[in-house]
Amino acid sequence: MPSSRRASTHIVALLAAFGLLATACGGGSDATSSKKSTRSTSTTAAASDTTDATATVLTAAWADDVTITVEDGKYRILANGIPNHERQAEYALPDAGVMIPSADTATAGADPTVEQSYDFSIPTAPTKAAISTSTSLGTIGIMVSGAALFNPYEGDGTTVATASNFTVKNAAGDDIAFLDTCNGHPTPMGEYHYHALPKCITSVVDGTSGPSHIIGIAFDGYLIYGNRDVDGKEVAADQLDACNGITSPTPEFPEGIYHYVLLDTADSMSSIRCFTGTVDASLSSMGGMPPGGPGGGPGGRPPGAGAIAT
């Protein structure tokens, strides 16, 4: 992934006003990673929520096609939804009328990914909610690649995408996967998105063995990281709270900050299942396909899910 970011003049001025040095968020190591701390297994957002992350977020490894500015206490993020990494030429696409495809109900077809018109306003200072809320259909966050993050589920709200990956044969007899090696795929309408740790992002942003860096922002404003702690060790599922969150040190925030962690796993902890923070109504209604739509659609919440205590 290119480490260059698009930054407007007023962003530079903003950084200067903060009196902060821009810290690039690419590569397999970071100067701040030398400041080691014991990883906390706290399962709630802590006082570190008040950390001013704005300058660091603005200098993260955003793709060239992503524009991010700060307006009235919110990040305004503009993106076309096309990730800045390679995708499959073909995907296993659901047959007409199929909600949750399998090898028997899908056909290999050309990648249907098309440009989106993302314009998200996400709080720069996340507010922990008294009760967490389930993530719902469609986009729940934006990744540094410019593509969307969905929750772990397919359109029925129960089928875990990474657990139900499969392949079909194309006309040449090649195996074509439902999910690509980046744990992503497009909806039939063309919105590319991830359901788990996007390894094609972390392999560049984090290197092959380094600690995880910022790879996205959830709609509640909390940052998203890969599956390694500040020492480069893999984060275990039992270290995370019900929403895949943890308060712990990161290379950018060695004193600790609450953030979400994406796992490379074939179960429901592969992505964010609930929001720890509050989400603006304009974002919580960003969902795509309604229940009952064609297969391969946006992830959803389990039937009957609502508030989740943390």
Image (cartoon, helix red, strand yellow):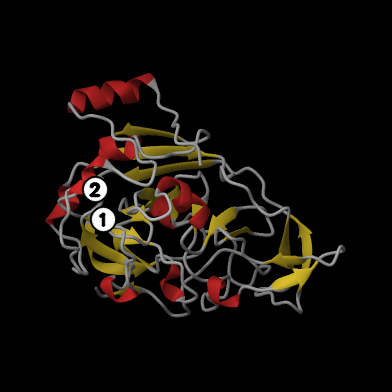
Tag 1 secondary structure: loop
Mark 2 or mark 1: which comes first in sequence?
Answer: 2
Mark sitting on residue 115: none
In the image: residue 277, left or right of residue 304? left
For image coordinates 27% across by 72% down, the residue present is: 239
Tag 2 secondary structure: helix
Q: Where 267 falls versus 244 (above or below)?
A: below
For image coordinates 49% across by 38% down, the residue present is: 63
x and y percentages locating residue 235 in the rendered image:
32, 67
x and y percentages locating residue 61 in the rendered image:
41, 40
Q: Is residue 98 visible?
A: yes
The quarter of the picture where the C terminus appears is bottom left
**In the image, farthest residue toward the right:** 171
x and y percentages locating residue 107 in the rendered image:
79, 68
Whether the residues at callouts 2 and 1 have beta carbons within 8 Å, the answer is yes
- Number of numbered discs on residues: 2
Three-letter code for the amino acid on which mark 2 is drawn: Ser
Residue position for label 1:
230
User: Mark 2 Cα within 10 Å, few/some/many (few <14, many 20+)?
Assistant: many
In the image: residue 180, left or right of residue 256? right
Three-letter code for the amino acid on which mark 1 is drawn: Val
Residue position for label 2:
33
x and y percentages locating residue 71 in the rendered image:
32, 33
Q: Is residue 96 visible?
A: no
User: Mark 1 Cα within 10 Å, few/some/many (few <14, many 20+)?
Assistant: many
